[in-house]
Image (tube, rainbow, N blue to C red):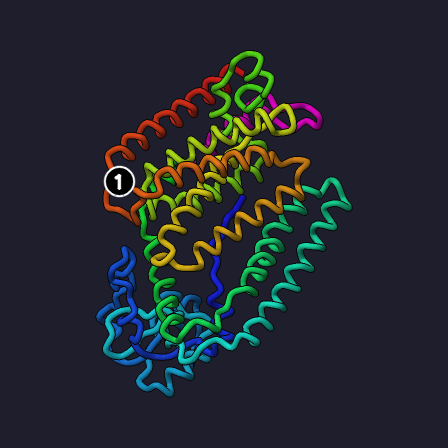
Amino acid sequence: MVFPMQDDSAKKNEAGGRPETGVGSWFRDEIPENLPWGDENLLESLPEEVGEGFGVKVVDGVTLDGIRYEPGQFIMVDSREDFARLLGAVPKVEGLVIPGYSRLVPTSLGMPHTHTVDLARYRKRVRADWVKAFLITAGLVGLAFTIPSLRFLGLIGAMMFGLFPLVDATMAWFRRVDLYTVQDLNRRLVNDEFFRRWLVTRPTGLLKIAVAVLVLIFAGQVLIDGAPRPGVTPTSLLAGALVKSAVLENGEWWRLLTTGLMHGSVLHILFNGMALYSLGRIVVALVSPSSLSIVFLVSVITGSLASLYLGPGAISVGASGGLLGCLAFLLVVTQKFQKELPNFLRSSLIQSTIVVSLFGILGVQFIDNAAHAGGFFGGLLIGLLGYRWLRLAPERSRPAVRIAGVGSALILLAGVAKVAWELFQA
């Protein structure tokens, strides 16, 4: 599963009439200094050699007036008129240089909104996006159910290129963006930009290690299983996945945990690894690394329990329960801090929840929806139980949370060791 963060800024910009580029440091008055990401230092400092004047930092190499500019170089001009022509000549810029300001201005903040959104024009664009997404979804779903051998790939494609934009457009249609004042639009614009920049600066070292561990476990599975054999259950899954008869008849309850550390295919580990990184970095940034390990552990187990007693099939595998738990936990977090956090973040999480639900219905033959629902419930439960104690991007977690986080991490590490041992013996 993949949970992309999206926003509707492009739609609002077009519909609202905000010029794509301009000059000025108007946004400095709108920086949310009371929030963790309200820091002007998130913008790149200009090197001294740039000097005064207008200019751009290019993303791709470009040749102007016989001079070659490489990616990352600055192109400077003296007047606004030359600046306007420069912007028309350079197809893609990383940021803008404006006189009297020592930092690179993001293109999204080149000029503020000057009037409110025209709802009719906004919805016209949204309608066109919806029709396009619907046709893509219908085509790929039709292909998936017409050619059984392409069903999984077809549904994955429908989710990524059809369902996500379809749900996004549906949600966008109901947004009354015309009710936002000009000041509201500008505050949202600045808050969104600084939040995105802040998010990518948050430490992700431990999260990368966690994803790498899942990949290494899958590599071990591949070494043991060899080439896939149709109709034959892979040896690695029998060794450590949620084999329901082994749990209920042999008392191997450890499988409730180890199954969440294993995967069934390259696509399975690819999408779950991407989803863990995407959701995990938000949990770590907004709450804490300790919360991520707690939520993931609890959600994997609640997802496994739901699959054990309610799910179809004799075997279930994958980290999806833990990932859905992270998604549900973030829905609680964004609900509590909805006034501070960018609206696009919560919208993206709701969008992902809807898409995963629809994907589960379409792919019921090979998706363990019980595990998804159980994991979602686990993450929701943790969020609700800790709701009153949640703090936004604290410098340090509460002692109890740190202790629980260390305990959860140790249990997960024990699960990794158990998987390694079972695969070694297989």
In the figure, is residue 386 to the left or right of 52?
right
Residue, x 71% and y 43% (percent of image)? 150
Corner quadrant of residue 381? top left
Identify the element where label 1 is drawn. loop
Numbered range of the magenta stretch: 211-236
Residue annotated with mark 1: 397
Q: Is residue 414 above or below residue 97?
A: above
Other residues around mark 1 within 10 Å, as few (<14) / some (14–19) / many (≥20): some
In the picture, the quarter occupied by the N terminus is top right
Q: Is residue 156 above or below residue 89?
A: above
Locate residue 237, reporting x and y percent: 57, 24
Where residue 376 sits: x, y (%)? 50, 39
**Residue 289 location (% of width, % of height):** 33, 39
Residue drawn at (61%, 65%) of the image: 129
| Image quadrant containing the C terminus | top right
Residue depicted at x 38% and y 79%? 22
Q: Is residue 107 visible?
A: no
Image-quadrant location for residue 338: bottom left
- Dominant SS of magenta comes to helix
Q: Amino acid at mark 1?
A: Ser
Residue in the image at 62% along x and 68% along y = 127
